[in-house]
Image (tube, rainbow, N blue to C red):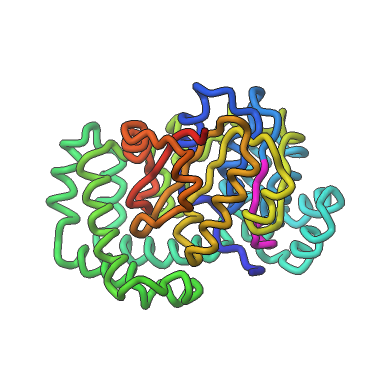
């Protein structure tokens, strides 16, 4: 795989931070993707954060973000990645390129147009979200109604607005079509949807929108804001990934040397690691056959410290893990439900968290 599928991680790193903070987790493994989780975990309490991704383009993205965090102030970084206006991104890249690993430098030398656009918006998922958001704003519910949702003062106010402006046949049809398997196959590899029916995603997202908007305040839900408008909510404390906040950016910059990017499969990357205190594995168990999942489980058990945190998500139905890992995993059902409720991305049916003994 040599395509950026995720310029931004579509999962809520607030969950990992909340799970980690009461524990003395110093050596952490997470999935690389767009780097948001890895950068948001870089604080003074950790010794190492390992961001693992089999996709070299994703690793090149993380390396460029790392170089930019190291050399730019926060405002310039936001401009460089596309969060605010900047006219000279290519010139900034020229100042950064010599600090990149050779593979990342080669990738970005060949994709300067992506740099000019802003690297936080060049992934396949960002293109897909633009399609969805533009259609919803322009043809279904209107920009004013969507903005009003984010300005509601209470869940009850959101619920009333949702019922009056969004709970329509036009809305339901649009979500079913825009989120359908056929639409997503225009953007994503077919093997991602091998076990999914045509209407599975549309039905799922209708349910997720309904739950998110009618049961939680969405004023800081930057995943919804990214979907509708292609932007974060910088005037809210948690309206962007933590590393983009003033405090989080300073912490990431101060601890950049603790980040290691590993371009490999998870099971192969873990073979070179030991004494890992926390595994934040996104939804890796949704992919691959049972043998692949068991291989990851075995690698986790070999790489862990005496006790280690484990957190993973499931977009699809829950899958079987290796009996050896299950025997040594103390899943905390109450905490898992709490963390799942905290998750704002709306992509996951369940979240599992606990301790590996």
Instruction: State which quadrant residue 159 falls in.
Output: top left
325 vs 308, nearest the viewer: 325
Q: Is residue 247 above or below residue 204?
A: above
Horizontal side, residue 128 vs residue 90: left or right: left
Residue at the (51%, 58%) spot, across then down = 293
Q: Is residue 208 above or below residue 123?
A: above
77 vs 345, nearest the viewer: 345
Instruction: State which quadrant residue 193 falls in.
Output: bottom left
275 vs 103, nearest the viewer: 275
Magenta stretch bounds: 50-58
The answer, for residue 68, to whether it is visible in the render is no
Q: Is residue 218 above or below residue 106?
A: above
The answer, for residue 237, to whether it is visible in the render is yes
Q: Is residue 247 above or below residue 170?
A: above
* Percent position of residue 34, x then y: 59, 52
17 vs 122, nearest the viewer: 17
Horizontal side, residue 267 vs residue 218: left or right: right
Quadrant holding the N terminus: bottom right
* Percent position of residue 92, x then y: 77, 50
Residue at the (41%, 74%) spot, across then down = 194
Q: Is residue 54 magenta?
A: yes
Residue at the (36%, 59%) spot, across then down = 316
Residue at the (84%, 58%) spot, across then down = 102
Q: Residue furthest right?
A: 98
């Amino acid at each position: 795989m040599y395509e950026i599928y995720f310029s931004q991680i579509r999962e809520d790193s607030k969950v990992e931070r909340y799970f980690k903070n009461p524990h003395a987790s110093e050596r952490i493994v997470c999935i690389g993707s767009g780097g948001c989780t890895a950068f948001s975990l870089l604080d003074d309490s950790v010794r190492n954060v390992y961001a693992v991704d089999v996709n070299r383009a994703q690793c090149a993205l993380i390396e460029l973000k790392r170089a930019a965090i190291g050399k730019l102030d926060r405002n310039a970084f936001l401009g460089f990645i596309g969060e605010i206006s900047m006219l000279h991104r290519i010139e900034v890249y020229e100042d950064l390129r010599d600090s990149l690993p050779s593979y990342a430098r080669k990738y970005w030398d060949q994709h300067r147009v992506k740099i000019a656009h802003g690297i936080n918006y060049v992934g396949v998922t960002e293109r897909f979200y633009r399609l969805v958001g533009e259609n919803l704003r322009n043809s279904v519910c209107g920009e004013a109604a969507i903005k009003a949702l984010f300005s509601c003062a209470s869940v009850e106010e959101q619920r009333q607005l949702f019922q009056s402006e969004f709970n329509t046949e036009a809305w339901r049809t649009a979500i079913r079509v825009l989120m359908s398997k056929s639409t997503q196959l225009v953007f994503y590899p077919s093997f991602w949807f091998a076990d999914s029916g045509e209407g599975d995603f549309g039905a799922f997202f209708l349910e997720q929108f309904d739950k998110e908007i009618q049961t939680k305040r969405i004023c800081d839900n930057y995943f919804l804001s990214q979907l509708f408008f292609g932007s974060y909510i910088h005037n809210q404390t948690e309206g962007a990934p933590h590393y983009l906040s003033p405090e989080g950016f300073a912490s990431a910059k101060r601890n950049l040397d603790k980040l290691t990017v590993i371009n490999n499969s998870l099971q192969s990357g873990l073979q070179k690691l030991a004494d890992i205190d926390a595994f934040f594995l996104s939804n890796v168990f949704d992919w691959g056959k049972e043998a692949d999942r068991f291989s990851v489980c075995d690698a986790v058990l070999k790489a862990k410290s005496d006790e280690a945190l484990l957190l993973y998500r499931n977009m699809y139905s829950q899958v079987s893990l290796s009996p050896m890992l299950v025997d040594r995993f103390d899943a905390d059902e109450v905490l898992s439900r709490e963390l799942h409720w905290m998750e704002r991305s709306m992509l996951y049916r369940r979240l599992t968290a606990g301790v590996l003994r």
